[in-house]
Amino acid sequence: DAGVTQSPTHLIKTRGQQVTLRCSPKSGHDTVSWYQQALGQGPQFIFQYYEEEERQRGNFPDRFSGHQFPNYSSELNVNALLLGDSALYLCASSPGQGNDGYTFGSGTRLTVV
Amino acid sequence: AQSVTQLGSHVSVSEGALVLLRCNYSSSVPPYLFWYVQYPNQGLQLLLKYTTGATLVKGINGFEAEFKKSETSFHLTKPSAHMSDAAEYFCAYTGTASKLTFGTGTRLQVTL
């Protein structure tokens, strides 16, 4: 049973560019959340998608946007990249609210130069 | 506002010794609490969780944690450390909001 799959695994972008990260949730999971993990820090919640709608949003600017598709997969888009956006981006999926725990993918390492 | 505090950013133990990683939370609603482990260049793996019911929770790889409401704590323990336990450990909380709030992590080093 495949877990959460993220692509690409690594990415290098230049300041000002735009990036799209992708996530396929674990089979049977319908809720997808995105987290940003800066080096040496704990993950920070970006937003959560359920039934193709953004259900919750963390303290991130509008440059961060997302989408969920009918098959529950999701994309995270970041516009006008800043050096400070360099981080590991983690996707997590769960059935429903997620109070029973989330399954995390291995992440996408984004480096902005 | 809800928060999670992990005491000790680095903990070093000898192989075979007790592992104790501390976590305290702040919440105005009943919490759901989790411990995750992260190995280098990898995502997070769920070790154990407390939702409701028994306050002593057993997880994978011999880890366990006890939810103490009076102390607002959820410390992670393992009776005997193994070299393979060396990793970063994160305590996380969620209440009714369903998003996870993480602590800053504790790096566990296991020495011979």
Image: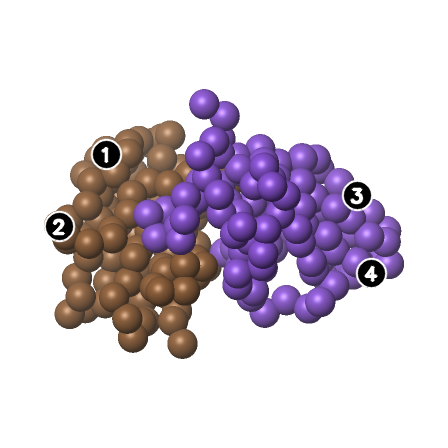
Measure the C-alpha gap from mark 3 to mark 2: 46 Å
Question: Which class describes the residues within 10 Å of circle 1: few (<14), some (14-19), or many (20+)?
Answer: few
Residue B62 or residue B99, whichever sits in front: B99
Q: Which chain is purple in the picture?
A: A
| Up/down of A16 relative to B79, above or below | below
The residue that mark 4 highlights is A80
Of tags 3 and 4, the one toward the viewer is 4
N-term-proximal mark, 3 vs 4:
3
The residue that mark 2 highlights is B54
**Residue A47 figure quarter:** bottom right
Disc number for residue B62: 1
Measure the C-alpha gap from mark 4 to mark 2: 48 Å
Callout 3, which amino acid? Ile
Callout 2, which amino acid? Ala
Q: Which residue is at 70% across, 60% downward?
A: A64
Q: Which residue is at 86% across, 58% downward?
A: A16
Q: Quadrant of the N terminus of chain A?
A: top left
Callout 4, which amino acid? Ala
Q: Return the x and y of residue B37 as percentages of the image width and height.
A: 41, 42
